[in-house]
């Protein structure tokens, strides 16, 4: 790993944040070189991506100080290659686009550096075509590793739609150049989401294993969970469900349960009754003898998996025993739909012996109300959150935050970002708009950290729209 992993680097950041004078912004020259500020910032961001909450208080101040540093630095400072590279890395780390544009406008650059800077500015401004054209001749592997990793991630992000195979190779390059960092976390997460599109089951399982092993406590872990569940449903016929079980075994019991609940729900809605039954059974099974039969979500999804088989009367009896008050709005709608289908089955003639079950048509219902919680020791565990609801943020969670002051001008090119979270009991409601306010007060430091992480993820993990 980079210097950010050293104890001396951590001590430098702590000292920097604790001793920075308030009048520093008024100084004619920054106290530190731009490249030094960016290295400190990267240290904090990489540790937060790995789940280190001790780094949260440092992040906002470092972002503010780095932005001030970039604005205050003279054009002569950026004639030093490492300072110019630091400017570009800051831009792709969630930096303020206005600052980047202002600084670049004051510089006299070689043609190659001007194209590099313009490509990154186009990316920040949501112009993927301009990004592709400006960075077409840039080979990330020929750049210094830190800059090359970010460039590989950016180029991969804008290549997903037209060249998914190339995007996957670029994500591999990003990981190769920057292991153990926020860049690798984003590249792995994008690889998990992209593998089903390429019908690459082996890559899907391998990337999922690596993500769970190293980044399950990342504030972006809920996005991984979404991609993981979708990939299982898409690739179920070509991947080993035993291997999926090995991956979920690395999660805690609650995380494993809700993954299988989400798979069961999606599979049932798609008419994949065997996969739904398998996932529902795994969710009920629990771990270490602690079964989940009493969970109303487990009861609902188990009923979903058998909606086209067995006795409709028995199924109605089972569904009728579910405590509706402990289901989200979306799952209550789903329960109503399944009960309606089951009621129709009780009056329908028996199907022909060779007739194939018809998938349940439940319409366009809201997504399941399931998230995954961080390990129990993590104080960021929330009380309740709806996985697909963009703005549901219990006590200390987030699904897709806003931007910190230092990056206030960053473009909103994607949804807010929510860490893996789960409620000990099912959520009682499921917001459907991005402007829903959180139900409880949140830790300001945690909120600010996640807001910044969202901006970073939007810039280097999500292709501009």
Image (spheres, rainbow, N blue to C red):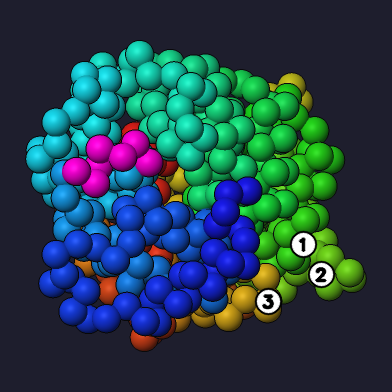
From mark 1 to mark 2, how far is it between C-alphas? Answer: 6 Å
Label whose residue precedes the other's in the sequence (1 or 3): 1
Q: What stretch is highlighted in magenta?
A: 76-82
- Helix, strand or loop status at disc 1: helix
> Could you tell which of marks 1 and 2 lies nearer the N-terminus?
1
At horizontal 38% and vertical 19% (from top left) the residue drawn is 138
Residue name at image x 32 percent, y 44 percent: 83
| Residue at 40% over, 73% down | 16
Question: x%, y% of residue 150?
Answer: 43, 37
Q: Is mark 2 on a helix, strand or loop?
A: loop
Q: How many marks?
A: 3
Q: Is residue 442 left or right of residue 97?
A: right
Furthest-bottom residue in this view? 441
Q: Quadrant of residue 19?
A: bottom left
Q: Mark 2 points at which residue?
A: 291
Q: What is the magenta segment's predominant secondary structure?
A: helix
- Indicate which label's residue lies in the foreground, 2 or 3: 3
Identify the residue at horizontal 16%, vertical 44% (top origin).
75
Q: Is residue 312 above or below residue 7?
A: above
């Amino acid at each position: 790993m980079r210097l950010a992993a050293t104890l001396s680097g951590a001590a430098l950041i702590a000292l920097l944040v604790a001793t920075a004078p308030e009048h520093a912004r008024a100084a004619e020259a920054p106290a530190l070189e731009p490249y030094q500020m960016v290295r400190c910032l990267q240290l904090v961001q990489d540790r937060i991506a790995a789940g280190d909450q001790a780094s949260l208080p440092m992040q906002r101040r470092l972002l503010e100080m780095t932005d001030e540093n970039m604005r205050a630095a003279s054009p002569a400072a950026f004639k030093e290659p490492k300072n110019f590279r630091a400017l570009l890395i800051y831009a792709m780390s969630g930096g303020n686009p206005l600052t980047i544009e202002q600084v670049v406008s004051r510089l006299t650059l070689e043609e190659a550096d001007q194209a590099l800077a313009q490509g990154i500015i186009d990316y920040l401004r949501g112009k993927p075509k301009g990004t592709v054209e400006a960075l077409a001749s840039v080979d990330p592997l020929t750049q210094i590793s830190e800059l090359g990793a970010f460039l590989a991630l950016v180029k991969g992000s804008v290549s997903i739609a037209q060249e998914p195979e190339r995007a996957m190779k670029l994500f591999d390059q990003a990981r190769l150049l920057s292991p153990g960092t926020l860049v690798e976390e984003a590249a792995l997460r994008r690889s998990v989401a992209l593998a089903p599109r390429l019908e690459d089951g082996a890559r899907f399982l391998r990337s999922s294993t690596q993500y769970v092993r190293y980044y399950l406590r990342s504030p972006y872990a809920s996005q991984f969970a979404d991609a993981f569940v979708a990939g299982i449903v898409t690739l179920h016929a070509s991947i080993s469900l035993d291997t999926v079980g090995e991956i979920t075994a690395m999660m805690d019991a609650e995380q494993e349960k809700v993954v299988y609940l989400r798979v069961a729900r999606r599979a049932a809605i798609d008419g994949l009754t065997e996969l739904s039954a398998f996932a529902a059974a795994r969710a009920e099974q629990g771990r270490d003898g602690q079964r989940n039969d009493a969970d109303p979500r487990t009861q609902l999804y188990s009923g979903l998996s058998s909606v086209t088989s067995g006795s409709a009367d028995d199924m109605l009896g089972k569904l009728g025993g579910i405590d509706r008050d402990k289901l989200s709005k979306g799952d209550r709608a789903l329960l109503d739909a399944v009960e309606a289908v089951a009621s129709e089955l009780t009056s329908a003639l028996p199907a022909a012996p060779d007739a194939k079950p018809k998938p349940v048509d439940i319409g366009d219902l809201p997504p399941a109300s399931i998230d995954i919680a961080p390990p129990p020791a993590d104080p960021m565990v929330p009380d309740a959150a709806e996985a697909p609801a963009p703005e549901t943020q219990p006590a200390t969670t987030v699904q897709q935050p806003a931007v910190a002051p230092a990056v206030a001008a960053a473009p909103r090119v994607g949804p807010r970002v929510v860490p893996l979270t789960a409620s000990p009991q099912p959520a009682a409601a499921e917001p459907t708009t991005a402007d829903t306010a959180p139900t409880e007060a949140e830790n300001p430091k945690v909120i600010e950290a996640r807001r910044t992480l969202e901006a970073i993820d939007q810039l280097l993990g999500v292709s501009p729209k």
